[in-house]
Image (spheres, rainbow, N blue to C red):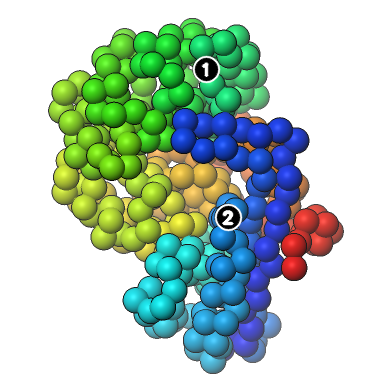
Amino acid sequence: MIIEAVTVTPMRVPLERAFRAATFTIDVRCTLVVRIETDAGAVGEVFIGDIRDHQGEVVKIIRDDIAPRLIGLDATRLGPCYAAMIGLSGGVHHRVRVMEAISAVDTALWDLFGKITGLPVHRLLGGAQDRVRAVVSCGYMGGADDTGALTEEAAERRDEGYGGVKIKVGFSEPHVDAARARAVRDAIGPDLVLICDANQGWDRYQASEFARSVAELNVDWIEEPTHWRDYAAGMAHVRQATGQQVGAGQNEMSSEGCRDLIAAGAVDVLNFDSSLGGGVSEWVRAATLAEAHEVRIAHHEEPLVSMHLLGAKARGLYAEYFSDARDPLTPRIAPEQPPVTDGHVTVPQSAGFGITLDRDYIARYAVD
Protein backbone atom coordinates (compact mmCIF):
# COMPACT_ATOMS: atom_id res chain seq x y z
CA MET A 1 0.00 0.00 0.00
CA ILE A 2 2.39 2.64 -1.29
CA ILE A 3 1.78 6.38 -1.06
CA GLU A 4 1.63 7.87 -4.54
CA ALA A 5 0.41 11.44 -3.96
CA VAL A 6 0.00 14.01 -1.19
CA THR A 7 -2.00 17.12 -2.05
CA VAL A 8 -3.21 20.10 -0.02
CA THR A 9 -5.88 22.70 -0.75
CA PRO A 10 -6.00 25.79 1.48
CA MET A 11 -9.38 27.41 2.18
CA ARG A 12 -10.42 30.78 3.61
CA VAL A 13 -14.03 31.55 4.55
CA PRO A 14 -14.72 35.18 5.60
CA LEU A 15 -16.87 35.60 8.70
CA GLU A 16 -19.86 37.91 8.66
CA ARG A 17 -18.50 39.67 11.73
CA ALA A 18 -15.29 39.58 13.72
CA PHE A 19 -15.06 37.62 16.96
CA ARG A 20 -12.89 38.96 19.74
CA ALA A 21 -11.32 37.08 22.64
CA ALA A 22 -9.05 38.47 25.35
CA THR A 23 -5.89 38.38 23.25
CA PHE A 24 -6.94 38.05 19.60
CA THR A 25 -9.59 38.80 16.97
CA ILE A 26 -10.84 36.41 14.27
CA ASP A 27 -12.53 37.50 11.03
CA VAL A 28 -11.90 34.48 8.78
CA ARG A 29 -12.20 30.69 9.16
CA CYS A 30 -9.40 28.81 7.43
CA THR A 31 -8.57 25.17 6.93
CA LEU A 32 -6.40 22.79 4.89
CA VAL A 33 -7.86 19.91 2.92
CA VAL A 34 -5.21 17.19 2.73
CA ARG A 35 -5.58 14.17 0.47
CA ILE A 36 -3.28 11.13 0.35
CA GLU A 37 -3.58 8.55 -2.44
CA THR A 38 -2.06 5.07 -2.68
CA ASP A 39 -1.19 2.69 -5.49
CA ALA A 40 -4.01 0.38 -4.39
CA GLY A 41 -6.65 3.09 -4.71
CA ALA A 42 -7.13 3.75 -1.00
CA VAL A 43 -7.50 7.47 -0.17
CA GLY A 44 -7.24 9.38 3.09
CA GLU A 45 -8.69 12.87 3.21
CA VAL A 46 -9.45 15.37 5.97
CA PHE A 47 -9.94 19.06 6.57
CA ILE A 48 -7.91 20.22 9.53
CA GLY A 49 -6.62 23.33 11.26
CA ASP A 50 -7.45 27.03 11.27
CA ILE A 51 -4.14 28.56 10.22
CA ARG A 52 -4.73 32.16 9.19
CA ASP A 53 -1.65 34.39 9.23
CA HIS A 54 0.86 31.96 7.73
CA GLN A 55 -1.30 29.49 5.82
CA GLY A 56 0.77 29.83 2.65
CA GLU A 57 3.98 28.89 4.45
CA VAL A 58 2.42 25.72 5.82
CA VAL A 59 1.04 24.76 2.42
CA LYS A 60 4.50 25.22 0.88
CA ILE A 61 6.10 22.96 3.49
CA ILE A 62 3.56 20.22 2.76
CA ARG A 63 4.04 20.44 -0.99
CA ASP A 64 7.79 20.98 -1.19
CA ASP A 65 9.13 19.10 1.82
CA ILE A 66 6.66 16.62 3.29
CA ALA A 67 5.11 15.17 0.12
CA PRO A 68 8.46 14.12 -1.42
CA ARG A 69 9.42 12.41 1.85
CA LEU A 70 6.21 10.37 1.98
CA ILE A 71 5.81 9.32 -1.64
CA GLY A 72 6.99 5.73 -1.98
CA LEU A 73 6.46 4.85 1.71
CA ASP A 74 4.10 2.14 2.97
CA ALA A 75 0.88 3.81 4.15
CA THR A 76 0.25 1.02 6.67
CA ARG A 77 3.46 1.83 8.57
CA LEU A 78 2.65 5.08 10.30
CA GLY A 79 5.80 5.06 12.43
CA PRO A 80 8.21 5.42 9.49
CA CYS A 81 5.85 7.95 7.87
CA TYR A 82 5.90 10.11 10.98
CA ALA A 83 9.68 9.75 11.33
CA ALA A 84 10.09 10.93 7.73
CA MET A 85 8.19 14.12 8.57
CA ILE A 86 9.37 14.97 12.07
CA GLY A 87 12.97 15.35 10.94
CA LEU A 88 11.91 18.62 9.30
CA SER A 89 11.28 20.19 12.71
CA GLY A 90 15.01 20.58 13.26
CA GLY A 91 15.70 22.16 9.89
CA VAL A 92 15.49 25.57 8.30
CA HIS A 93 11.75 26.10 8.69
CA HIS A 94 10.03 27.76 11.62
CA ARG A 95 9.19 24.91 13.99
CA VAL A 96 5.62 26.04 14.56
CA ARG A 97 4.95 26.03 10.82
CA VAL A 98 6.53 22.61 10.38
CA MET A 99 4.50 21.08 13.19
CA GLU A 100 1.28 22.52 11.76
CA ALA A 101 2.15 21.03 8.37
CA ILE A 102 2.96 17.65 9.93
CA SER A 103 -0.30 17.83 11.88
CA ALA A 104 -2.41 18.12 8.75
CA VAL A 105 -0.66 15.32 6.87
CA ASP A 106 -0.45 12.96 9.84
CA THR A 107 -4.21 13.35 10.40
CA ALA A 108 -4.86 12.41 6.79
CA LEU A 109 -2.54 9.40 7.18
CA TRP A 110 -4.64 8.17 10.11
CA ASP A 111 -7.81 8.60 8.06
CA LEU A 112 -6.13 6.57 5.32
CA PHE A 113 -5.02 3.88 7.77
CA GLY A 114 -8.56 3.60 9.11
CA LYS A 115 -9.91 3.16 5.59
CA ILE A 116 -7.29 0.52 4.81
CA THR A 117 -8.17 -1.45 7.94
CA GLY A 118 -11.90 -0.76 7.78
CA LEU A 119 -11.91 0.67 11.32
CA PRO A 120 -12.79 4.09 12.74
CA VAL A 121 -9.84 5.98 14.17
CA HIS A 122 -11.18 5.87 17.74
CA ARG A 123 -11.19 2.06 17.57
CA LEU A 124 -7.64 2.00 16.19
CA LEU A 125 -6.53 4.08 19.18
CA GLY A 126 -8.31 2.14 21.91
CA GLY A 127 -12.06 2.62 21.53
CA ALA A 128 -12.76 3.41 25.19
CA GLN A 129 -15.94 5.42 24.50
CA ASP A 130 -18.49 5.42 21.70
CA ARG A 131 -20.05 8.69 22.88
CA VAL A 132 -18.51 11.93 24.18
CA ARG A 133 -20.02 15.08 25.61
CA ALA A 134 -20.30 18.03 23.21
CA VAL A 135 -19.63 21.59 24.38
CA VAL A 136 -19.82 24.80 22.38
CA SER A 137 -17.50 27.78 22.65
CA CYS A 138 -19.26 31.14 22.89
CA GLY A 139 -19.14 34.51 24.61
CA TYR A 140 -16.82 36.30 22.22
CA MET A 141 -16.77 40.12 21.98
CA GLY A 142 -16.92 40.37 25.74
CA GLY A 143 -17.03 43.24 28.12
CA ALA A 144 -19.19 44.66 30.86
CA ASP A 145 -22.07 45.48 28.50
CA ASP A 146 -22.66 42.16 26.75
CA THR A 147 -23.99 39.97 29.56
CA GLY A 148 -27.50 39.87 28.12
CA ALA A 149 -26.31 38.77 24.69
CA LEU A 150 -24.00 36.20 26.24
CA THR A 151 -26.67 34.60 28.41
CA GLU A 152 -29.08 34.52 25.48
CA GLU A 153 -26.47 32.77 23.35
CA ALA A 154 -25.64 30.27 26.10
CA ALA A 155 -29.31 29.45 26.60
CA GLU A 156 -29.71 28.91 22.84
CA ARG A 157 -26.84 26.45 22.85
CA ARG A 158 -28.41 24.62 25.79
CA ASP A 159 -31.68 24.39 23.86
CA GLU A 160 -29.81 23.07 20.80
CA GLY A 161 -28.77 20.10 22.90
CA TYR A 162 -25.16 20.82 23.78
CA GLY A 163 -23.85 19.39 27.02
CA GLY A 164 -21.99 22.52 28.06
CA VAL A 165 -20.58 25.88 27.09
CA LYS A 166 -17.12 27.41 27.12
CA ILE A 167 -17.26 31.17 27.57
CA LYS A 168 -14.58 33.71 26.87
CA VAL A 169 -13.25 35.68 29.83
CA GLY A 170 -10.09 37.71 30.42
CA PHE A 171 -11.48 40.82 28.69
CA SER A 172 -12.12 42.76 31.85
CA GLU A 173 -11.42 43.01 35.54
CA PRO A 174 -11.90 39.62 37.19
CA HIS A 175 -15.04 40.62 39.08
CA VAL A 176 -16.70 41.75 35.82
CA ASP A 177 -16.00 38.45 34.08
CA ALA A 178 -17.05 36.57 37.22
CA ALA A 179 -20.43 38.30 37.00
CA ARG A 180 -20.71 37.22 33.34
CA ALA A 181 -19.89 33.64 34.31
CA ARG A 182 -22.49 33.75 37.07
CA ALA A 183 -25.13 34.93 34.62
CA VAL A 184 -24.26 32.11 32.22
CA ARG A 185 -24.52 29.51 34.96
CA ASP A 186 -27.98 30.84 35.81
CA ALA A 187 -28.94 30.70 32.12
CA ILE A 188 -27.80 27.13 31.43
CA GLY A 189 -28.73 25.59 34.77
CA PRO A 190 -26.69 23.52 37.21
CA ASP A 191 -26.16 20.38 35.14
CA LEU A 192 -24.39 21.59 32.02
CA VAL A 193 -20.61 21.88 31.86
CA LEU A 194 -19.25 25.42 32.24
CA ILE A 195 -15.67 26.24 31.19
CA CYS A 196 -14.12 29.72 31.32
CA ASP A 197 -11.38 30.47 28.77
CA ALA A 198 -9.18 33.52 29.47
CA ASN A 199 -6.85 33.03 26.48
CA GLN A 200 -3.87 34.15 28.61
CA GLY A 201 -5.59 37.43 29.44
CA TRP A 202 -4.67 37.87 33.12
CA ASP A 203 -1.69 37.86 35.42
CA ARG A 204 -1.59 35.19 38.11
CA TYR A 205 -3.20 37.40 40.76
CA GLN A 206 -6.09 38.49 38.55
CA ALA A 207 -6.62 34.88 37.51
CA SER A 208 -6.65 33.78 41.13
CA GLU A 209 -9.17 36.50 41.99
CA PHE A 210 -11.44 35.27 39.19
CA ALA A 211 -11.07 31.64 40.29
CA ARG A 212 -12.11 32.48 43.84
CA SER A 213 -15.04 34.57 42.60
CA VAL A 214 -16.52 31.66 40.63
CA ALA A 215 -15.84 28.95 43.19
CA GLU A 216 -19.55 28.27 43.77
CA LEU A 217 -20.40 28.03 40.06
CA ASN A 218 -18.99 24.54 39.49
CA VAL A 219 -16.68 25.71 36.71
CA ASP A 220 -15.11 22.59 35.24
CA TRP A 221 -11.86 24.36 34.48
CA ILE A 222 -10.38 27.77 33.77
CA GLU A 223 -8.49 27.64 30.51
CA GLU A 224 -5.16 29.41 29.99
CA PRO A 225 -5.78 31.94 32.78
CA THR A 226 -2.31 33.54 32.83
CA HIS A 227 -0.15 35.56 30.40
CA TRP A 228 2.24 33.74 28.06
CA ARG A 229 5.25 35.10 29.95
CA ASP A 230 4.02 33.46 33.17
CA TYR A 231 2.36 30.48 31.60
CA ALA A 232 3.21 27.23 33.40
CA ALA A 233 4.32 28.81 36.68
CA GLY A 234 1.36 31.18 36.69
CA MET A 235 -1.15 28.40 36.12
CA ALA A 236 0.48 26.31 38.85
CA HIS A 237 0.09 29.30 41.15
CA VAL A 238 -3.63 29.58 40.33
CA ARG A 239 -4.19 25.88 40.98
CA GLN A 240 -2.36 25.93 44.29
CA ALA A 241 -3.77 29.23 45.53
CA THR A 242 -7.42 28.58 44.68
CA GLY A 243 -8.03 24.87 44.26
CA GLN A 244 -9.65 25.59 40.89
CA GLN A 245 -8.93 23.20 38.05
CA VAL A 246 -6.89 24.65 35.19
CA GLY A 247 -6.74 23.53 31.55
CA ALA A 248 -4.12 24.30 28.90
CA GLY A 249 -2.03 22.74 26.15
CA GLN A 250 -3.46 24.12 22.92
CA ASN A 251 -0.40 26.33 22.40
CA GLU A 252 2.09 23.49 22.77
CA MET A 253 3.53 22.06 19.57
CA SER A 254 4.80 18.72 20.91
CA SER A 255 4.18 16.06 23.53
CA GLU A 256 7.37 17.26 25.21
CA GLY A 257 5.78 20.66 25.77
CA CYS A 258 2.80 18.91 27.34
CA ARG A 259 5.18 16.89 29.50
CA ASP A 260 6.65 20.12 30.84
CA LEU A 261 3.20 21.55 31.67
CA ILE A 262 2.35 18.41 33.61
CA ALA A 263 5.71 18.36 35.38
CA ALA A 264 5.21 21.99 36.44
CA GLY A 265 1.90 21.14 38.10
CA ALA A 266 0.21 23.60 35.74
CA VAL A 267 -2.78 21.59 34.49
CA ASP A 268 -5.62 19.39 35.60
CA VAL A 269 -6.85 19.16 32.00
CA LEU A 270 -4.59 18.87 28.95
CA ASN A 271 -6.26 20.23 25.80
CA PHE A 272 -3.44 19.56 23.34
CA ASP A 273 -4.51 20.34 19.76
CA SER A 274 -3.65 17.66 17.20
CA SER A 275 -4.07 20.20 14.37
CA LEU A 276 -1.22 22.32 15.75
CA GLY A 277 1.12 19.96 17.54
CA GLY A 278 2.02 17.14 15.18
CA GLY A 279 -1.22 15.35 14.41
CA VAL A 280 -2.83 12.25 15.81
CA SER A 281 0.51 10.52 16.38
CA GLU A 282 1.80 13.27 18.64
CA TRP A 283 -1.57 13.74 20.37
CA VAL A 284 -1.54 10.08 21.41
CA ARG A 285 1.86 10.55 23.02
CA ALA A 286 0.62 13.59 24.94
CA ALA A 287 -2.56 11.79 26.01
CA THR A 288 -0.54 8.86 27.28
CA LEU A 289 1.53 11.23 29.42
CA ALA A 290 -1.66 12.75 30.76
CA GLU A 291 -3.09 9.34 31.63
CA ALA A 292 0.09 8.40 33.48
CA HIS A 293 -0.21 11.53 35.65
CA GLU A 294 -4.00 11.38 36.26
CA VAL A 295 -4.53 14.49 34.15
CA ARG A 296 -7.81 14.65 32.25
CA ILE A 297 -7.67 14.80 28.45
CA ALA A 298 -9.41 17.35 26.24
CA HIS A 299 -8.85 18.74 22.76
CA HIS A 300 -8.93 22.26 21.36
CA GLU A 301 -11.50 22.65 18.57
CA GLU A 302 -11.76 20.30 15.52
CA PRO A 303 -14.76 18.27 16.80
CA LEU A 304 -14.96 15.82 13.88
CA VAL A 305 -11.39 14.72 14.58
CA SER A 306 -11.32 15.22 18.33
CA MET A 307 -14.36 13.06 19.01
CA HIS A 308 -12.33 10.09 17.74
CA LEU A 309 -9.29 10.95 19.84
CA LEU A 310 -11.29 11.62 22.99
CA GLY A 311 -13.43 8.56 22.38
CA ALA A 312 -10.27 6.46 22.29
CA LYS A 313 -9.41 7.38 25.91
CA ALA A 314 -11.31 6.59 29.10
CA ARG A 315 -10.41 10.04 30.43
CA GLY A 316 -11.29 11.78 27.17
CA LEU A 317 -13.59 14.73 27.73
CA TYR A 318 -15.49 17.03 25.40
CA ALA A 319 -15.72 17.60 21.66
CA GLU A 320 -15.57 21.39 21.23
CA TYR A 321 -17.89 23.03 18.68
CA PHE A 322 -18.54 26.63 17.62
CA SER A 323 -21.67 28.42 16.50
CA ASP A 324 -22.26 28.62 12.75
CA ALA A 325 -21.40 32.33 12.82
CA ARG A 326 -17.98 31.64 14.34
CA ASP A 327 -17.36 28.53 12.22
CA PRO A 328 -19.49 28.47 9.08
CA LEU A 329 -17.07 26.01 7.47
CA THR A 330 -17.43 22.84 9.54
CA PRO A 331 -21.15 22.19 9.04
CA ARG A 332 -20.91 22.92 5.30
CA ILE A 333 -17.68 21.26 4.22
CA ALA A 334 -18.84 18.03 5.90
CA PRO A 335 -22.65 18.15 5.79
CA GLU A 336 -23.11 14.55 7.00
CA GLN A 337 -22.16 14.73 10.67
CA PRO A 338 -23.28 12.86 13.77
CA PRO A 339 -25.90 14.98 15.55
CA VAL A 340 -25.49 16.39 19.03
CA THR A 341 -28.22 14.76 21.12
CA ASP A 342 -28.83 15.01 24.86
CA GLY A 343 -25.53 16.78 25.31
CA HIS A 344 -23.45 14.13 23.56
CA VAL A 345 -22.25 13.05 20.15
CA THR A 346 -21.87 9.43 19.04
CA VAL A 347 -18.52 8.81 17.39
CA PRO A 348 -18.89 7.48 13.81
CA GLN A 349 -18.24 3.79 13.30
CA SER A 350 -17.32 4.12 9.64
CA ALA A 351 -13.72 3.71 8.54
CA GLY A 352 -11.21 6.47 9.24
CA PHE A 353 -12.72 9.67 10.60
CA GLY A 354 -15.96 9.10 8.74
CA ILE A 355 -15.84 12.53 7.08
CA THR A 356 -17.31 13.04 3.60
CA LEU A 357 -16.33 16.38 2.06
CA ASP A 358 -18.42 18.68 -0.13
CA ARG A 359 -16.36 19.30 -3.29
CA ASP A 360 -18.39 22.31 -4.40
CA TYR A 361 -17.88 24.03 -1.05
CA ILE A 362 -14.14 23.38 -1.21
CA ALA A 363 -13.93 24.80 -4.72
CA ARG A 364 -15.87 27.89 -3.67
CA TYR A 365 -13.46 28.87 -0.90
CA ALA A 366 -10.16 27.40 -2.12
CA VAL A 367 -7.47 30.09 -2.30
CA ASP A 368 -5.02 28.43 -4.65
Element at label 2: loop
Q: Which residue is mark 2?
A: 53
* 77 relative position to 243: left or right: right
Percent x, y for residue 185?
46, 12
What residue is pinned by disc 1? 143
Relative height, residue 76 to residue 236 (above, below):
below
Is residue 193 shown to the viewer in this render?
A: no
Of helix, strand and loop, which one carries label 1?
Answer: loop
Q: Quadrant of the C terminus?
A: bottom right
Q: Which residue is more in the foreground, 209 or 82?
A: 209
Image location (x, y in percent) of residue 227? 32, 36
Amino acid type of the residue that numbered disc 1 sits on in the rendered structure:
Gly
- Report which quarter residue 57 is drawn in: bottom right
Question: Residue at horizontal 46%, vertical 57%?
Answer: 276
In this rendering, is residue 18 above or below 63?
above
Q: Residue at x 21, y 47 (%)?
A: 262
* Mark 1–mark 2 distance (CA, rounded to whole Å): 26 Å
Q: Residue furthest bottom?
A: 72
Horizontal and vertical percent for residue 334? 71, 52
Is residue 18 positioned above or below 3 on the image? above
